[in-house]
Image (cartoon, grey):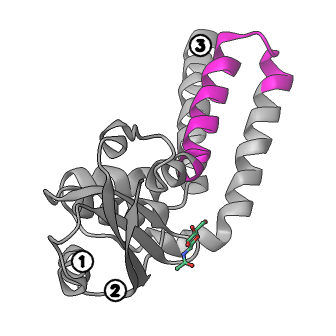
Amino acid sequence: MQHKSSLLSDKSSYIWAIITGLLSSSCCIIQLVLNIFSIGCAGFSILTPYRPIFLSFTTILILYTITKYGLKSKRTLIILLISLSLSSSPELISLYNQGRITSNSEKSLIKEIEIFVVQIEGISCEGCANRIKTQIDSKPFVIDSKVYFNNQSAIVSVIPGNYKSIDIETWVKMVDFKYEAKVIQQYIESKY
Ligand SMILES: *[C@@H]1O[C@H](CO)[C@@H](O)[C@H](O)[C@H]1NC(C)=O
């Protein structure tokens, strides 16, 4: 009897860590999984405004686990790991989308790059921004791209002379027709 009930609360606290963590991440993790299956950017971003509320649930769960099981228990460790990794995922994906955790070794070999600054309306979360980045990065002459959810824009670096503004606007449109993409700046940057 004793054993059974403790098993149940074992599982349920992990499940709560996952649920509050996923909710705290707004659409990020779920959308990233959907991206793998090429499922469009869904409506999870409606959760974004409530993120502070879900984050406080996560905090309460962590504090509760620590007071009940102590800081050094395995359960506390796992709950912390699940909660923190899930709820911080939007920030991690944001860093990736902004090209801060990708290697730029290829870029340094190229002497001239053409830059397109694109305004993209309709990006609803970091997971969706990531979908746009993946699409742009898949094009052969793209050196790298940064997609900003915060100010709804992207900076695309390409090997000069291969693409026109309309190409880039079309790529974004191909991800989802709801996006309104417009190139607002285009210039060549020389590395000499
Ligand atoms: C969006 O923000 C980034 C930095 O966070 C900046 O580099 C970029 O130029 C901004 N985009 C536009 C269109 O202002």
Is 166 situated left or right of 149 in this image? left
Residue 80 at x, y = what percent? 67, 28
Say if mark 1 contacts mark 2, CB within 8 Å: yes
SS state under label 1: helix
Residue under pointer 3: 1
Residue under pointer 1: 168
Identified at 53% across, 40% down, the residue is 18
The numbered mark, 3 or 1, whose residue comes first in the sequence reads: 3
What is the count of numbered marks?
3
Is 191 located above or below residue 149 in the figure?
A: above
The numbered mark, 2 or 3, whose residue comes first in the sequence reads: 3
Residue 2 at x, y = what percent? 64, 12
Inspect the magenta stretch and tell me whether residue 81 lies in it.
yes
Q: Amino acid at mark 2?
A: Ala
Residue 38 at x, y = what percent? 18, 60
Whole-angstrom CA distance, mark 3 to mark 1, is: 63 Å
Q: Which residues are magenta?
A: 66-91
SS state under label 3: loop
Is 92 situated left or right of 68 in this image? left
The numbered mark, 1 or 2, whose residue comes first in the sequence reads: 1
Inspect the magenta stretch and tell me whether residue 93 lies in it.
no
